[in-house]
Image (spheres, rainbow, N blue to C red):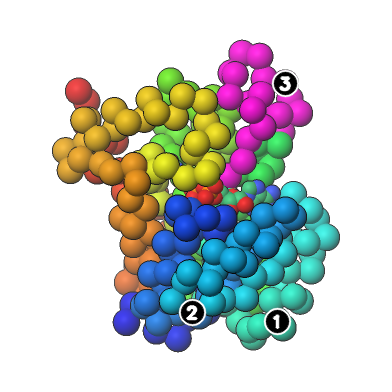
Amino acid sequence: MLLEGKKLLVTGVLMDSSIAFHVARLAQEQGAEVILTSFGRTFRITQSIAKRLPTTPEVIELDVSDQEHLDTLAERLREHTDHLDGVVHSIGFAPAGAFNFLEADWEDVATAVQVSAYSLKSLTVASLPLMGEGGSVVGLTLDATKAWPVYDWMGVAKAAFESTNRYLARDLGPKGIRSNLVSAGPIATTAARSIPMFEQFEKWGERSPLGWDLRDAEPAAKACVALLSDWFPATTGEIVHVDGGFHAMGF
Ligand code: NAD
C-alpha cells in the first residue's frame, strides 16, 4: 500500500464533499493513520462526518487564525502520535466582500490571505516538531496564474499560497521535507459554493481534453495521496495540475 504505516494530519474535512474527506479516505485505504482537524461551530460536524471514513479518526481543534491553537498543536498532536509523516493543508476562506475585486476592503483581503495563504506556513511550522526526513506537506490550489471571472481576492490569496509553497520548499528541503500543491479543477464543495456564480465553472469540462466532473473530488485526492507517498522523493516546490488538462489548452 502506498502509505503503509504513515501518520498524517489532514485539515479541512467539513463535509463528505470536502476534498480533504477523500484524501483521508484514500489515505486510510492505502494504510495510513489519519488525524483530522476542525474548529469552532464546524467541529461537531467534522466529528460526525469522520464516522463515514473507513476508520473513525481523532479530530483535534485547529483554527489557523488562532495563534494559541497553532502554538499548542504539536503538544496536542503528541497525545495521539509521536511523529507525523505528512500534513495536508485543505483550508480556504474569504469573506463575501473579498469576492468583489474593486470594492473589497483590506480587512476582508487580510482575512483571505491569512486563512488561505499564510496558514500554509503557520500550519507547517506548527507541525514541524513532529516531522522529519521524508516528511511531505501537500496543499490545494486553484490555478493562480490567471484572473477568473469570479474568485477575485481569493485568487490573489492563492497566488500568495503558491509562492508560499515555493519558499517552504526552499526552507524545508534541507530537513528532507517536501512541500507541494495540487492545482485542482473546480469541485462542488461547501467552500466552492460560497463563491458567487460558481456555476460559471461548469464550462471547465468543455475546455478540458479529459473532461471534468465538478462532483468528483477523487482525482485531486489521489494526487494528494501520491505526493504524500514515497513515490515523489525528489519533487518539491511543485504544483501538480489535476484539472482534466484545462491549464494546458488555449481554446
Ligand atoms: P471545504 O469547504 O470542504 O473545505 C474548506 C475547509 O477549510 C473547511 O473544512 C473549513 O473548516 C476549513 N477552514 C476554513 N477556515 C479555517 C480556519 N480559520 N482554520 C482551519 N480551517 C479552516 O472546501 P474544499 O473545496 O474541499 O476546500 C479545500 C481546499 O481546496 C481549499 O484550499 C480550496 O481553496 C482548495 N480548492 C478547492 C477547489 C474547489 O473548486 N472546490 C478547487 C481547487 C482548490
Please state which amino acid type lies under the numbered disc 3. Asp
User: On the image, which quarter does residue 101 sit in?
Assistant: top right
Q: Rounded to the nearest whole Å, what is the CA distance between mark 3 and mark 2?
A: 43 Å
Q: Where does label 2 land, which residue?
A: 55
Residue at 66%, 44% (x, y): give it: 115
| Numbered label attached to residue 105 | 3
Mark 2 within 8 Å of ligand 1, using the beta carbon: no
Mark 1 and 3 residues: CB-CB less than 8 Å, in contact? no
| Numbered label attached to residue 78 | 1
- The local secondary structure at tag 3 comes to loop
Question: Which is nearer the eye, 163 or 98?
Answer: 98
Please identify, in this view, whether the residue under mark 2 or under mark 1 is nearer the observer.
Answer: 2
Q: Residues within 10 Å of mark 2 (few under 14, many from 20)?
A: some
Please state which amino acid type lies under the numbered disc 1. Arg
Q: Residue furthest top?
A: 102
248 up-or-down from 75: above or below: above
How far across and how far down the image is residue 238, in percent?
40, 52
Q: How many marks?
A: 3
Residue at 20%, 40% (x, y): give it: 211
How far across and how far down the image is residue 65, in percent?
74, 49
Please state which amino acid type lies under the numbered disc 2. Thr
Q: Residues within 10 Å of mark 1 (few under 14, many from 20)?
A: few
Earlier in the chain: of badge 2 and badge 1, it is: 2
Q: Residues within 10 Å of mark 3 (few under 14, many from 20)?
A: few
How far across and how far down the image is residue 58, in percent?
62, 76
Q: Which residues are magenta?
A: 92-110
Mark 2 and 1 residues: CB-CB less than 8 Å, in contact? no
Mark 1 within 8 Å of ligand 1, using the beta carbon: no
- The local secondary structure at tag 1 comes to loop
